Amino acid sequence: KQEVTQIPAALSVPEGENLVLNCSFTDSAIYNLQWFRQDPGKGLTSLLLIQSSQREQTSGRLNASLDKSSGRSTLYIAASQPGDSATYLCAVTSGGSYIPTFGRGTSLIVHP
Amino acid sequence: GAVVSQHPSRVICKSGTSVKIECRSLDFQATTMFWYRQFPKQSLMLMATSNEGSKATYEQGVEKDKFLINHASLTLSTLTVTSAHPEDSSFYICSASTGGREQYFGPGTRLTVT
């Protein structure tokens, strides 16, 4: 059974810092890995989707990497802004499933 | 494209009553819809998977008589929480798929049972 862990659980940084959020998974036979953003009381916004054959994806100030062999993914946020404050969720879809397994998320606060 | 809506966004009901939550795919046909539940500071937990026109498949530990799911059309699925109790208070999120592995998530519904 796939298990997804996100570290740290919470993070508070000053504006402008570059950040790394970590996601690890136990079963490396994955189909894809996705990073989501969730604002308080809101649904999920997809940020980046990495297929199993890919090593990284970039969108604006966000860069996500994937290392299947070590069971890890990182989400890099450059030049953080207060508007980046949210919970970031990592979800892994395993090779034999259509259902993603979610981590508990990293709660990020970027203060001015 | 690929927009999913949920209604209502927030609902407060009294213990013992039933409440219905709608999930709609606005610009695509969803052959499969999923219902998740999220407690504070917890990850999303899948409750059930429903395919249009057939009975939903519930995850282990989810009471199918309590959480009634109907997927009557390719754009609408409903979740009815019957005889709700305070412990059912949670954030319910649906997602929709066209049959592939990508899911499109709705904005969620906050249910509070008093």
Image: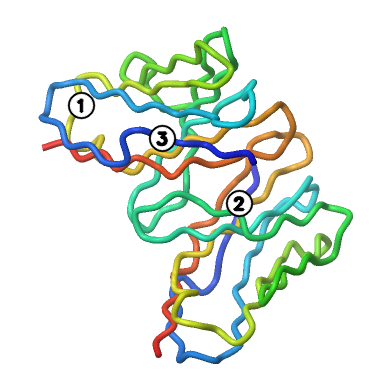
Secondary element type, mark 1:
loop
Residue occupied by mark 2: A3
Residue farthest along the right direction in this orientation: A53
Secondary element type, mark 2:
loop
Q: Image quarter for residue A45?
A: bottom right
- Label 2: chain? A
Q: Image quarter for residue B86?
A: top left
Residue occupied by mark 3: B6
Tag 3: amino acid: Gln
Distance Cα–Cα, label 2 vs label 1? 30 Å
The percent position of residue A15, horizontal first and vertical second, equals 48, 90
Tag 1: amino acid: Ala
Mark 1 vs mark 3, foreground winner is 3
Distance Cα–Cα, label 1 vs label 3? 19 Å
In the picture, the quarter occupied by the N terminus of chain A is top right
The percent position of residue B13, horizontal first and vertical second, equals 15, 31
- Please name the residue shown 48% across and 40% down the image: B106
Left or right for B114, reference A101: left
Distance Cα–Cα, label 3 vs label 2? 28 Å
